[in-house]
Image: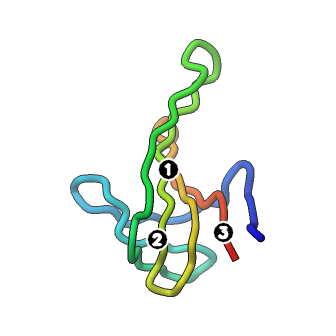
Amino acid sequence: MTRLWRTGDPIHAHTDANGDLLSFTWQGQSHVVAIIVNRWRVDLDWWDQRLCREYFKLTTATGLLVIVYHDLMAEAWCIQRLYD
């Protein structure tokens, strides 16, 4: 079972100089990234309302398996899915 936030739930991300996600704060708790399982970019509807995001499927040191994304247009970070 998973929990999905279609529009994302805001997080505060901490990245290195290359843009790699190191940790994030969500709902007042800090989570250190243990492993980035997958990373991909989506660039859709460039002719209309552009959606440009970089997604990360990752595990944290606290045991979470999540998908987070970086909205490259708005410079915002969000969690989109939490796996149980």
Image x and y of residue 11, in percent: 55, 64
Q: Earlier in the sequence, mark 2 or mark 1?
A: 2
For label 2, the residue is: 24
Image x and y of residue 33, in percent: 41, 74
Image x and y of residue 7, in percent: 71, 49
CB within 8 Å, label 1 to label 3? no
For label 3, the residue is: 82
Please state which amino acid type lies under the numbered disc 2: Phe
Image x and y of residue 10, in percent: 61, 60
For label 1, the residue is: 55
Please state which amino acid type lies under the numbered disc 3: Leu
Count neighbours of disc 1 (C-alpha within 10 A) and say few if under 14, some if 14 to 19, many if 20 or more. Answer: many
Farthest-out residue, top: 47
- Mark 3 element type: strand
- Mark 2 element type: strand
Disc 2 from disc 1: Cα separation: 14 Å
Disc 1 from disc 3: Cα separation: 13 Å
Which residue is rendered at x = 58% and y = 12% of the image?
47
**Residue 35, image quadrant:** bottom left
